[in-house]
Image (cartoon, rainbow, N blue to C red):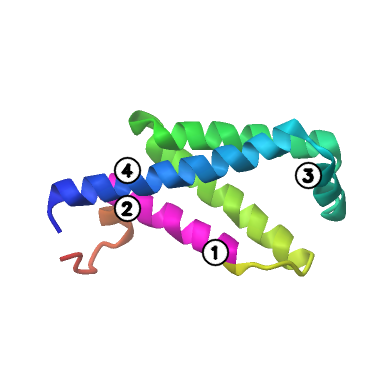
Amino acid sequence: MSPKAIKITGWVLSGLLALLFAYSAGMKLMANDQTLKMASDMGFDGSTFKTLGIVELLSVVLFFIPRTGVVGALLLMAYMGGAIATHVQHHLAVPPNLLIETLIWIAAALRFPELAQRLFRGIPME
């Protein structure tokens, strides 16, 4: 795969993830009846759910800005780790969250080759 194709793939994947997280954050911030019920079922009150929405939105903005992208990627990975833990605790489906976590890792590795080099040192990437 050419460097240009890798860069485009990384940005397309980042854009799709940004849309997904922006939608999720928006639902938390709007706090309609359905999201408040979901929050309550997981043991969160409305203000905590709104705080999670703000954290999610800030993380995705940092991820999308090239200069802060690595920090944003790490924050999104940590956020998804918490989501996975919450889903496990409440016996909810985990595979969709694992897929999103994997896509964040792939997008970060494609967009930030230095990150991939540090993580996969010794593993042939070509």
Sequence-first disc among 2 and 4: 4
Sequence-first disc among 2 and 3: 3
User: Residue at image x 44%, y 46%?
Assistant: 16
| Residue under numbered circle 1 | 98
User: Residue at image x 29%, y 54%?
Assistant: 116
User: Residue at image x 76%, y 39%?
Assistant: 49
Sequence-first disc among 1 and 3: 3
Q: Which mark is nearer the camera, 1 or 4?
A: 4
Residue type at mark 4? Answer: Trp
Residue type at mark 3? Answer: Thr
**2 and 3 marks in contact (CB < 8 Å):** no
Is residue 91 depicted above or below 47 in this figure?
below
Q: Which mark is residue 35?
A: 3
Residue type at mark 1? Answer: Leu
Magenta-drawn segment: 96-113
Q: Secondary structure at mark 3?
A: helix
